[in-house]
Amino acid sequence: MKTLFVGIIAMCVASVAMASGNLRVNMEANENEATVVEISSGEMVHFEIELTDEYGNSIYEMNSEVPRSEMEKRYDFSALDNGIYWYSVRTGDEEIRKQLSIEYGEVEVMDVRKTVDPYFFQEGDQIKLSYLNFENENINLYVYENNTLLTEVALGKDFAIHKAIDLSELNYGVYEVVLTNENDIYEHSVVID
């Protein structure tokens, strides 16, 4: 049984690891006051692009209409107010967010965040999860029933996090399993019957 569990987790990690790392977002200034963004993925996907200000207000958003593996966009940021902005590209469960400082149209990349959504798998009364922690942040897991916290588990800062949570002592019902890092919240509903 233990060998089977290790095998299943290894397959999950391999599939998550193979699927991640495909998304690339490169930015460079152009001589015509434009910033060129080159986006690529190892497979044909829909790109979801968004530019937000430091308060989360959407400035620009675009979803590719057909799947593609590459895309090039040109932006003129000279009309934007000086400040901090976030440029994000998402494909399915993978996202790259770049924090930009824009001053008089000049763009400087201040920070880059790469995330891949966690993988949750329910087997009976156990929830198994895999998460690639690219930012090496503190990861916490919470279990809620009707907005009441039942359990909290600190999962650490490791790059590859794998955990099985035993929910066998819970009553029949619907529960929320929540995984958090310093910037993201991932929720997964679980039914114990």
Image (cartoon, rainbow, N blue to C red):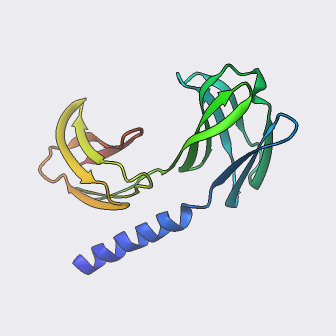
State the image coordinates of residue 107 (x, y, percent, origin top left).
Answer: 69, 35
125 shown above or below 47: below
Does residue 59 appear anywhere in the picture? yes
Q: Residue furthest right?
A: 32
In front: 163, or 169?
163
**Residue 134, located in which quarter of the rendered image?**
bottom left
Q: Residue at x 35, y 49 (%)?
A: 137
Q: Residue at x 26, y 54 (%)?
A: 156
State the image coordinates of residue 38 (x, y, percent, origin top left).
Answer: 75, 50
Q: Residue at x 23, y 42 (%)?
A: 143
37 shown above or below 14: above
- Report whether 69 appears left or right of 126: right
Does residue 1 appear anywhere in the picture? no
State the image coordinates of residue 166 (x, y, percent, origin top left).
Answer: 18, 56
In front: 51, or 153?
51
**How many numbered badges does the structure rendering display?**
0
Picture quarter with the N terminus: bottom left
In front: 140, or 4?
140
- Report whether 171 appears left or right of 74: left
State the image coordinates of residue 181 (x, y, percent, origin top left).
Answer: 36, 43
In front: 61, or 55?
55
Q: Residue at x 32, y 59 (%)?
A: 158
- Report whether 90 appears left or right of 184: right
Q: Residue furthest bottom?
A: 3
